[in-house]
Amino acid sequence: MRVVHTFADARAAEGVDQALVPTMGYLHEGHLSLIHQAKAETPVVCVSIFVNPTQFDEASDLASYPQDLERDLALCESAGADTVLVPSVDEVYPTPLDPIDPGPAAEGMEGAHRPGHFEGVATVVHRFLTALEPHHAYFGRKDAQQLAVIRTMAHEHDLDVEIIPGSTEREEDGLALSSRNVRLGDDRVRAAGISEALFAAADAAEAGERSAAGLQAMVELEMQVRGLQPEYVTLADAVWMKPVGEVHREAVLATAVPVGDVRLIDNIVLSIEGSGVVVDRGIRLDAPSILYS
């Protein structure tokens, strides 16, 4: 495995099919599943580790983001990565970049609560995709709105790359994996109520409930019982992230919840299959996450 610090050194040789797995480090099983997926589908896999300052709307969140490069490099190598790109801020932003408009998929939910966040995401991902020119790039479904923003951005800018989603990975109790989970402390048990509330709505959807009002109200009630107060609970179409009144094509039921000092996001994906609704709840680990090892 090569560890490099410039885009020039990370680019694959001409004609070589390369995949990119972009990360901000402090890797967990969700990242590793994307690396494994990329490795199974693409000859050369490049993992990037870059904590992007432009997508943090609060300096304190950037300062507290966990980092451990030695640990991350060992995990990348064990997962089969061919190259790990660890660029400096100056390498990514050698001159002020023209901001990339994240488009209409960024307008609600996270976009409404974190102004400028998706502009930062779209700008840095555009920079990585144009500098590395991978044929495939892998992103987790846990960040459903980010996935939609990146897909539409790549299409609007005619980038020759396929954006490939990976399933949401969850801890044993259902909590969606996030590097921020290590900061939960005594709030860790309460945080599991986020996925429990979403799964209650998933059960209702599979039993026949399709209305946004019904599904959203169920999530809000289940969270209230568990002492959680979501910033939003939204049923949105999976492509443009616009609120919908009912499940009539692929949609996400998404939420953001502050738990103590940590803000967590999660979602489930609802699809129509035959005359019913099927729900992708993600994949649960069967052992404690490496986040805590």
Image: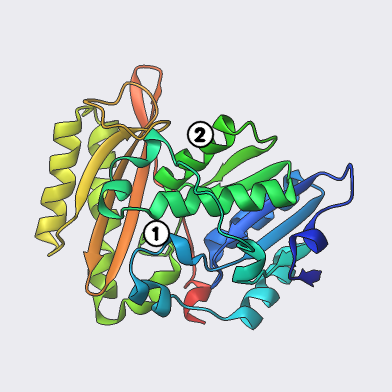
Which of the two discs, 2 and 1, labels the residue nearer the N terminus? 2
Query: Going by the image, does 80 lie left or right of 230?
Result: right
Q: In this picture, is 72 found above or below 20? A: below
The Cα–Cα distance between marks 2 and 1, rounded to whole angstroms, is: 25 Å
Residue name at image x 75 percent, y 55 percent: 45
Residue name at image x 14 percent, y 49 percent: 220
Residue 87: % across, % down: 67, 69
Point out the image quarter for the N terminus. Answer: bottom right
Q: Amino acid at mark 1?
A: Ala
Query: Is residue 200 in view from this perspective?
Result: yes
Residue 128: % across, % down: 64, 53
Query: Going by the image, does 147 lie left or right of 240?
Result: right
Query: Is residue 279 in view from this perspective?
Result: no
Residue name at image x 39 percent, y 54 percent: 117
Q: Which mark is residue 162?
A: none
Circle 1 is placed at which residue position? 176
Q: How is the image coloured?
A: rainbow
Q: In this picture, is 54 found above or below 128? A: below
Q: Nearer the viewer, residue 284 or 138?
A: 138
Residue name at image x 80 percent, y 53 percent: 44
Tell me where residue 124 sits by quadrant. Answer: bottom right
Residue 227: % across, % down: 12, 65
Tell me where residue 81 sits by quadrant. Answer: bottom right
Helix, strand, or loop for circle 2? Answer: helix
Residue density around tag 2, few if under 14, some if 14–19, many if 20 or more, within 10 Å? many
Q: In this picture, is 290 found above or below 109? A: below
Helix, strand, or loop for circle 1? Answer: loop
Circle 2 is placed at which residue position? 152
